[in-house]
Image: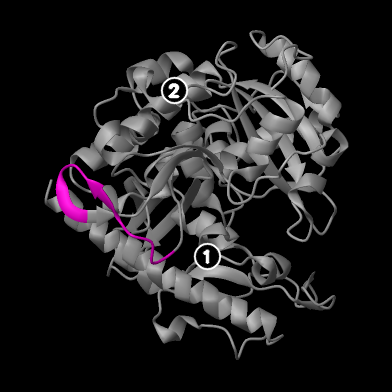
């Protein structure tokens, strides 16, 4: 837009250093006379290019700062009830053209060529404020780490494989770890053609998942700076770069369990150095952690890979008669988040339920003797039909919260046989959580019904029998 730019457009560091002058300010602080503000989705990014970086908007498929090999991304933040910054949404990287993407390998893909190096500008979201008045908080010059790229490459290949099978309409964010195929558009939008099926598929885009972006934000916040040029990972990693060059992440983890399949849990505990002296209630989780982590961390759910993927490991106990007595608990309901979230796909519950799970199954051999053996371990993604049930579950929870009916008699119950229910975890009855209207209510938790957990295990048994 002008002949001389206040930065070197071929130098990523120069662009990053210039971006710091936007922090703590808004685009209105840089607005030029006669500029016509953009509207619609993507408008903020376009205006950052035009108003702040003084660039013309174009339809060039190359990265925004092509001479520096760097993409510009503006990502919204929200604040928690504790006034902490939170990631509001996934980082959308590029739309998926089902017919074109199957012709590209990862190293020549639109995602890889554009998004290896990114300038991330985090701003504070406020739906009641003009886009020109949104404040920018953090600037991050970020190159995807080599190890993460190996996992992302595997994610990309999983997505492509599903499209090549004619199953683009069955894509789920739970299929993958860091790189997701997220829904775009609204319900009722026309479906897209896919190359190997006559069935239309919803519009989707490659994205870096919410959990992954939380890791980036956490590093920035913990650095104590509003601008950082390097983001490192969490120290407690489960796998190495060398391992990922030979095998996928899930295969590495599963291989650690295979030598213990069919063994009694007490024998495994002794072999892995797990102390069961006081018969801890979480002994099966302790054993599963010891196997999966291979002494690399105490809790795999807090490992680098699980946290970045939003993945959860859960143990399941099956009695000798096939009964699963215990329902499966998740986190407490954030009543404010539920009340303020306008779309199921943006909800915390959707993120939890659409993420990848690792189930470790211990089975009783003789009824009543509690001689459990490690029977199975598998990764699982909730099906679309179950996610449809989960959406109804969330809608009911939202209506209940908005109506202020936060008590046992209003929630779905396990006896309703609707796959999911709401009840407290084992905790003090006096534990309360804030609500959207400024009050406090008893803490309740998201749960899988025990019969739904049984259904998951039985479906897995069928898969094993069918090879």
Asked if residue 324 shows in the view, the reply is no
Give the residue displayed 72% in from the left and 24% down from the top: 54
Q: Front-most of 389 and 13?
A: 13
Q: Position of residue 259 (x, y in %)?
A: 31, 32
Q: Front-most of 341 and 400?
A: 341
Residues drawn in magenta? 187-199
Q: Position of residue 299 (x, y in %)?
A: 58, 40
* Residue under label 1: 344
* Residue 101 left/right relative to 426: left
* Residue 225 left/right relative to 412: right
Asked if residue 125 shows in the view, the reply is yes
Q: Is 103 included in the stretch rendered in magenta?
A: no
Q: Quadrant of the N terminus?
A: top right
Q: Which mark is residue 250?
A: none
Give the residue displayed 36% in from the left and 66% down from the top: 386
* Residue under label 2: 112
* Residue 18 left/right relative to 325: right
Q: Is residue 89 above or below residue 5?
A: below
Q: Quadrant of the C terminus?
A: top left
Q: Residue furthest front?
A: 34
Q: Residue furthest left?
A: 466
């Amino acid at each position: 837009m002008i002949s001389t730019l206040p930065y070197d457009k071929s130098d990523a560091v120069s662009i990053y250093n210039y971006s710091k002058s936007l922090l703590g300010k808004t685009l209105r602080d840089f607005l030029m006379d006669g500029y016509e503000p953009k509207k619609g989705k993507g408008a903020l990014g376009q205006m950052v290019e035009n108003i702040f970086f003084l660039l013309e908007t174009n339809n060039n498929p190359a990265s925004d700062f092509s001479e520096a090999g760097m993409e510009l991304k503006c990502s919204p933040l929200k604040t928690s009830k504790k006034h902490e910054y939170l990631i509001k949404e996934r980082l959308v990287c590029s739309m998926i053209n089902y017919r074109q993407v199957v012709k590209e390998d990862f190293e020549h893909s639109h995602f890889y060529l554009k998004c290896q190096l990114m300038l991330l500008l985090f701003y504070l979201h406020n739906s009641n404020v003009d886009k020109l008045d949104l404040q920018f908080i953090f600037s991050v010059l970020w190159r995807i780490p080599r190890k993460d790229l190996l996992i992302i490459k595997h994610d990309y290949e999983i997505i492509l494989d599903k499209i090549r099978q004619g199953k683009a309409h069955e894509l789920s964010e739970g299929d993958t770890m860091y790189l997701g195929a997220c829904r775009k558009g609204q319900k009722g939008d026309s479906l897209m053609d896919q190359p190997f099926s006559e069935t239309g598929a919803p519009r989707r885009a490659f994205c870096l998942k919410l959990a992954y972006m939380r890791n980036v934000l956490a590093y920035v916040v913990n650095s104590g700076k509003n601008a950082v040029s390097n983001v490192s990972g969490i120290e407690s990693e489960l796998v190495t770069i060398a391992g990922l060059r030979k095998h996928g992440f899930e295969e590495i983890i599963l291989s650690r369990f295979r030598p213990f399949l069919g063994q009694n849990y007490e024998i495994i505990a002794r072999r892995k150095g797990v102390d069961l002296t006081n018969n801890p209630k979480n002994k099966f989780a302790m054993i599963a952690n010891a196997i999966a982590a291979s002494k690399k961390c105490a809790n795999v759910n807090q490992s680098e890979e699980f946290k970045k993927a939003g993945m959860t490991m859960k143990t399941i106990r099956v009695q000798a008669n096939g009964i699963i007595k215990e329902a499966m608990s998740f986190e407490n309901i954030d009543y404010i988040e539920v009340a303020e979230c306008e779309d199921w796909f943006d909800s915390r519950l959707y993120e939890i339920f659409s993420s990848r799970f690792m189930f470790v199954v211990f089975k009783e051999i003789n009824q009543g003797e509690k001689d459990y053996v490690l029977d199975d371990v598998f990764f699982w993604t909730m099906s679309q039909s179950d996610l449809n049930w989960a959406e109804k579950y969330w809608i009911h929870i939202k209506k209940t919260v908005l109506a202020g009916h936060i008590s046992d008699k209003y929630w779905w119950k396990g006896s309703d046989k609707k796959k999911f229910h709401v009840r407290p975890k084992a905790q003090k009855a006096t534990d309360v959580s804030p609500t959207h209207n400024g009050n406090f209510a008893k803490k309740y938790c998201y749960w899988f019904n025990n019969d739904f957990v049984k259904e998951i295990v039985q479906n897995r048994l069928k898969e094993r029998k069918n090879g």
